Image (cartoon, grey):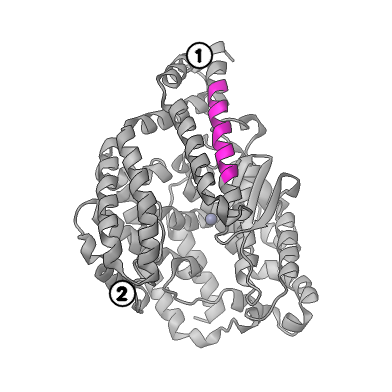
Amino acid sequence: MGEKFDALKARLGEIHNLNMVTSLVGWDQQTYMPPGGAEAKASQMATLSRLSHDMFVSDETGRLIEDAAGEVEGMDYESDEASLIRVIREDYAEQTKLPTELVAELTRQTALAHEVWANARANNNFRAFQPALEKIVELTIRQAEYLGYQDEPYDALLNQYERGITTRQVKAIFDEHKPELVKLIADVRANADAVSDAVLRQPFDVDKQRAFGLDVVQKYGYDLSRGRQDVAVHPFCTNFSRNDVRITTRFNPNWLNPALFGTMHEAGHAMYEQGVAPALEGTPMASGTSLGVHESQSRMWENMVGRSKGFWSWALPQLQAIFPDQLGSVDLDSFYKAINKVQPSLIRVEADEATYNLHIMLRFELETQMMAGKLNIADLPEEWNDRFEAFFGITPESDTLGVLQDVHWSSGLVGYFPTYALGNLLAAQYYNQALKAHPSIPDEIASGQFDTLRGWLNTNIHQHGRKFTSEELTRRVTGESIQSRDYIQYLKTKFSDVYGL
Ligand code: ZN
């Protein structure tokens, strides 16, 4: 490439390196750091983030982008070079729109709010958190005004996590499948006795759980010569290169699900990052394109593959050999039902496949109203509980188990929740497309073969990194936009079988 493009790439490479080292410090913070290191680590991360941010939003970077853009003019839209300029121009425009003073104020308020929220949650006292949340919402609305939007402020916030998607689009998708979900859950509740998951809630040796989980995800295609697994309270996946993608897991000695399905989930994220094309390594393009597409990968390996009957026809005998006392006498059908038990829960992070999106819709409705100035923060607990009753048929007995449960708002993350639900929808769309291309996939899964599915995902999704937006990618892969039809069909088929509906 030309000199100017190379100069831009070199600068972006340095910024990328700073960001990757910041991630490494973050990984250490959540895995091996002794508690005493917290203060120093926070300060080190703040320094690294500031250096990276200052370098990126500088006039120098802006000049390099425009100079390099001249050199790639006329190049193919899908080329690495044209894609880099397109994506980095948008990043630059977005990050330079926010005044430093506003960014600093948001950082300060959210740092303070975290402690306030944690105490309010522990003491079931929403009123203690209310002033901090009011401040954050006010700053977030200002942030949206600076970022700019077409129809409403919430568009600007959504766009930070799922580029190009609009509030109107999300609302339409949610409105379309909300009644279906509410009905499905009511039907399942009426047949709750059909499924027991007691077999999963027994003592299971943690080392054996770990060995089995790792074996499964290596067969999926998670490459441990370029990855590793550690223990963390809140499981996550992080990467410092496509050749160093790490997952963390939480083990429960008396319940099989968290570690087993959590490992599959995080490995789904990890395979996406490991699968980015080598040519994009060291550039800001070497990453998953959006939170929603990322979540589609984790959900697919966790649910569509990992909770399917075919998968367990292959895996159950192996798990029974490891845990003969606990699982020796369970048959495939009962085990399959147990891992797919639907249990309307007050807590989002414990929600099953069937109820998960309703938890998100509730937050989406509240967030959009808050951002539009149509909802008084003081009324949030009541608004939360009314919706919860309408969606799930149960009412939270406390704000700790209701409006105060999630960390997101205290961190200033508004517009983030919808990406979880969009991930579920995309997982179903992509999986159906993979099955169309390779009808043999279910049979392969039932014999412990996953290469065809992973290869298809790599070719169609992983290798592109951030080249295409979520919308562009979904159109390329499936020929249409994101929709809820495939997901609802998937849930109906599965839970009719599990609950005999
Ligand atoms: Zn995830």
Residue 236 visible to an observer of this rendering: no
- What's the residue type where badge 1 is placed? Glu
The range drawn in magenta is 10-25
Question: Considering only vertical position in the picture, is 411 above or below 329?
Answer: above
The x and y percentages for residue 207 are 74, 67
* Foreground residue among 292 and 204: 204
Q: Is residue 158 left or right of residue 340?
A: left
Q: Secondary structure at mark 2?
A: helix
**Residue 71 image label:** 1
Q: Secondary structure at mark 1?
A: helix
Quadrant hosting residue 132: bottom left
The x and y percentages for residue 400 are 37, 71
Q: How many marks?
A: 2
* Foreground residue among 421 and 18: 18
**Residue holding disc 2:** 390
Crowding at label 2, few (<14), some or many (≥20) Cα neighbours within 10 Å? few
Q: Is residue 339 left or right of residue 414?
A: right
